[in-house]
């Protein structure tokens, strides 16, 4: 008898076919993303669930009385209550590695787009506001040979550092909870304490996972240390930044600009202050959003789920839950 699973998000057809061949599948049929309450009502006797971002805590786990595996289609897993999962001996998996290069590409995209004011000047041209003789009004900032400070030197951080140092001749420094001498030597990058990194970098890229220690890691104090000419980039999680402090820093031109793919509240409300700022670029949380990467991530999540339900060890168990 095939294991019963609940699929709480849309999947590419080849991935759905793979799951149908190995499991008895039920699907979320509602509009938009499934909520925690809806998942609790839907999960029933499913032994496994595949989802993205929906909180999985006591409410869902009490309802899912036969649940054995939670497969999170995401590199991050801050939506999972790890203590509750561990207490019930439920396996949780995620999809690291697959999106690393794609997310790193987006990090460099935001650095370039903010420095050269791409979104702002695109609007200028399309709205017919481009005039002869306004060259100085179009000036941006150079990226090459500038200092990039990366906060969080995991796999994606290393991928960005490689692009920045070797592709744009940037002076790359980083702050991490532990130093990585091998990466320093291999990539030609340097370690700095956080305050020094903030005060000397031309671009600051935030790449930490969301944990109790990194929640609102960047706030009023940290932004005040940055150069007035510096640009702040966040492709980690919105909650790693004190958004109100960042709004103030941008409104007062305490920093030159920002490029954000993540926000405290998503989707971003249409009346949010960010929507009125020309000196920042806002993207709809698209870090891994290419067709190839999302297909590969979906297959990784599906394989993790099937392996766990058929007695094999999943490839990508959440680190905190590894035996």
Image (tube, rainbow, N blue to C red):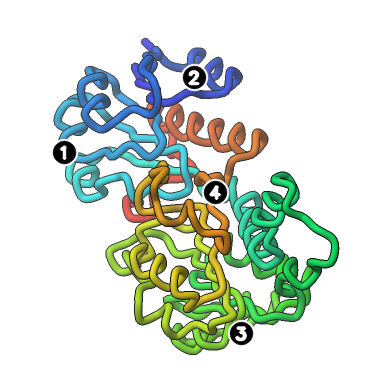
- The image quadrant where one finds the N terminus is top left
Query: Which tag, 1 or 2, sits closer to the chain's start?
Result: 2
**Disc number for residue 19:** 2
Q: Earlier in the sequence, mark 4 or mark 1?
A: 1
Q: Which residue is mark 3?
A: 190
In the figure, is residue 220 to the left or right of 103? Answer: left
Residue extending furthest right? 132
Nearer to us of marks 1 and 2 is 1
User: Which residue occupies 70% across, 76% down?
Assistant: 186
> Which residue, given by chain and number where applicable, does mark 1 sit on?
58
Q: Looking at the picture, how far across and down is residue 101, in whole percent?
A: 65, 53
Q: Residues within 10 Å of mark 2 (few under 14, many from 20)?
A: some
Q: Secondary structure at mark 2?
A: helix
Disc number for residue 14:
none
| Label 4, residues with CA under 10 Å away: few <14, some 14-19, many ≥20 | some
Q: CA distance from mark 1 to mark 2?
A: 26 Å
Q: Position of residue 310 (x, y in %)?
A: 41, 26
Q: Nearer the viewer, mark 3 or mark 2?
A: 3
Give the foreground label among 2 and 4: 4
Q: Which residue corresponds to the image point at 42% horizontal and 76% vertical from the top-left?
A: 177
**Visible residue check, residue 30:** yes
Residue at the spot of label 4: 283
């Amino acid at each position: 008898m095939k294991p019963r699973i609940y699929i709480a998000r849309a999947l590419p057809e080849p991935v759905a076919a793979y799951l149908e061949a190995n499991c008895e599948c039920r699907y979320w049929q509602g509009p938009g993303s499934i909520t925690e309450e809806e998942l609790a009502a839907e999960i029933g006797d499913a032994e496994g669930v595949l989802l993205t971002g929906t909180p999985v805590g006591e409410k869902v786990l009490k309802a899912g009385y036969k649940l054995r595996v939670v497969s999170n289609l995401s590199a991050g897993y801050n939506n999972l209550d790890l203590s509750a999962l561990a207490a019930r001996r439920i396996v949780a998996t995620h999809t690291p590695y697959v999106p690393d290069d794609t997310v790193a590409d987006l990090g460099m995209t935001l650095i370039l787009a903010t420095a050269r004011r791409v979104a702002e000047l695109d609007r200028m041209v399309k709205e017919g506001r481009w005039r002869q003789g306004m060259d100085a009004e179009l000036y941006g900032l150079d990226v090459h040979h500038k200092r990039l400070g990366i906060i969080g030197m995991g796999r994606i951080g290393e991928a960005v550092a490689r692009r920045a140092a070797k592709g744009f001749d940037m002076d790359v420094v980083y702050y991490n909870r532990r130093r990585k001498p091998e990466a320093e030597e291999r990539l030609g990058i340097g370690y700095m304490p956080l305050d020094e990194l903030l005060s000397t970098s031309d671009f600051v890229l935030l790449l930490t996972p969301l944990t109790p220690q990194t929640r609102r890691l960047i706030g009023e104090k940290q932004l005040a240390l940055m150069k007035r000419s510096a640009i702040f980039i966040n492709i980690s999680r919105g909650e790693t930044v004190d958004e109100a402090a960042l709004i103030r820093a941008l409104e007062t031109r305490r920093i030159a600009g920002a490029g954000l793919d993540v926000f405290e509240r998503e989707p971003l409300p249409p009346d949010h202050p960010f929507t009125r700022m020309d000196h920042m670029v806002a993207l709809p949380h698209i870090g891994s959003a290419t067709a190839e990467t999302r297909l590969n991530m979906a297959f990784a999540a599906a394989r993790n789920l099937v392996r766990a339900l058929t007695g094999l060890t999943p490839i990508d168990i959440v680190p905190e839950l590894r035996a």
